[in-house]
Amino acid sequence: MATQTNIDKLNQSISSFLSLPKERIFRPELGVESSEKFLSDVLNDLYDKIAVIQQVAKDVSNTPVQTVTAHLDALFNHLSSFSALNNQDFVAQKPSVVENVYANIDAILNVWPQFYITHLELFPKESKEQKSHSEAIALTEDIKAKAKSADETLESLKQIIEETNQIKEAAKNTAQGVSVIDAQKQFTSAQSNLYLKIIIASAGAAIFLIWFFGLAFYFLNAADNLNDEWTWKIAYHASIRGVILASIAAISTYFLTVLKAYLHLLEHNLHRQRVANSTEAFVAAATTPEQKDLILAKLVESVTNFGDSGLLKASSNDSPASNINFDVSAKT
């Protein structure tokens, strides 16, 4: 027979468990996200069994009493924490909590026949009809069938959790794909504008260079018509021609500088396009979320840090992201 200490612990566990607020556990106001359809029947059935267990605990051995006490305490801890969550966390943690509830109830059902048979022996029906041994066995088999059904329900819940995780992963991959596509569209749009600016800068540089060399050739030929005698007019005309040539040369230099800058930007944008086009393949090659995050961070860094194109004097010769380090060994 169970000791008084174990019976007192059982009564305390039952009292704590029965004090749990059902409305906070089920939350029917959440509709399809409510836990009522998963927990209502099994908990109501457990409440009925607890009344029987408490009634005959003193006439049962210590082991089943301790088993029920331990799993009622576990149920109280899980469900009390569950009932205190806000609605968002409630929905997120519902699958794991339901799984834990089923597991603990299943453990209680394993020792339930001992309590039930004891109850039949101690409390016969008011009609004085005694339950036969075969009827007790039949009831025990029915309890085992219910326990098996609970196991099947638990397996179904595990499958639902796994499918949910797969859907989340697919949604995450889809979002990454959409982000890459948006980046590719932006880089392609920027490419068209750069081509137009390069054409304008090239045309301006060509026009002023042709003008510069044309005037220089003209001024050289005009020198043959000058008199050998030195006059102030020679210095005057020479200074004017020098200013004109210097102005045209300065404008030509400006257009060439702008052209080199746009060519640098063009190479940078082509580099970004190549990285964006390769992002999905590199990320898909990773085997763990940690590897994916590391590869994606390096690729984003490579997009923003182009390195030295050789077109601008101020270009960095050693960009921190010019070489992408793919040391993404598996992390466990």
Image: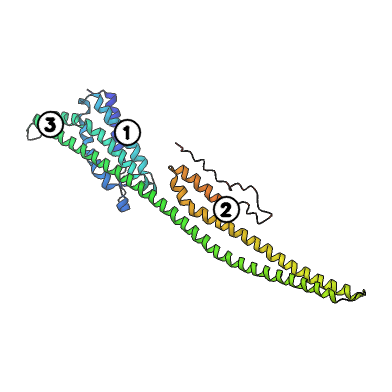
Q: Which mark is residue 137?
A: 3
Relative height, residue 104 to residue 307 (above, below): above
> In terms of sequence position, does the residue under pointer 1 or pointer 2 come before the other?
1
Q: Nearer the viewer, residue 29 or 252?
A: 252
Between the C-alphas of marks 1 and 3, the distance is 29 Å
How far from the left and from the top, in percent, is residue 125? 10, 34
Quadrant for the C terminus, please: top left
Instruction: Examine the rendered structure and indicate whether residue 55 appears above or below residue 265.
Output: above
Q: Is residue 1 left or right of residue 187?
A: left
Q: Amino acid at mark 3?
A: Ile
Q: Horizontally, is 246 left or right of 20 in the view? A: right
Q: Position of residue 16 (x, y in %)?
A: 31, 36
Of residues 194 and 47, which is closer to you in this image? Answer: 194
Relative vertical location of residue 195 with respect to residue 147 in this rendering, above or below: below
Quick one: 235 or 67, which is closer to the camera?
235
- Considering the numbered disc 3 on the image, is that residue within a helix, a strand or a loop? helix
Q: Residue at x 28, y 25 (%)?
A: 6
| Among numbered discs 1 and 3, the one appearing first in the sequence | 1
Kindly identify the residue that appears in the image at 44 percent across and 46 percent down. Answer: 285
List x then y, in percent, for residue 263.
62, 60
Report helix, strand or loop for mark 1: helix
The answer to whether residue 86 shows anywhere in this view is no
As shown in the figure, which amino acid type bears the numbered disc 1? Asp
- Residue type for callout 2: Thr
- The residue identified by callout 2 is 304
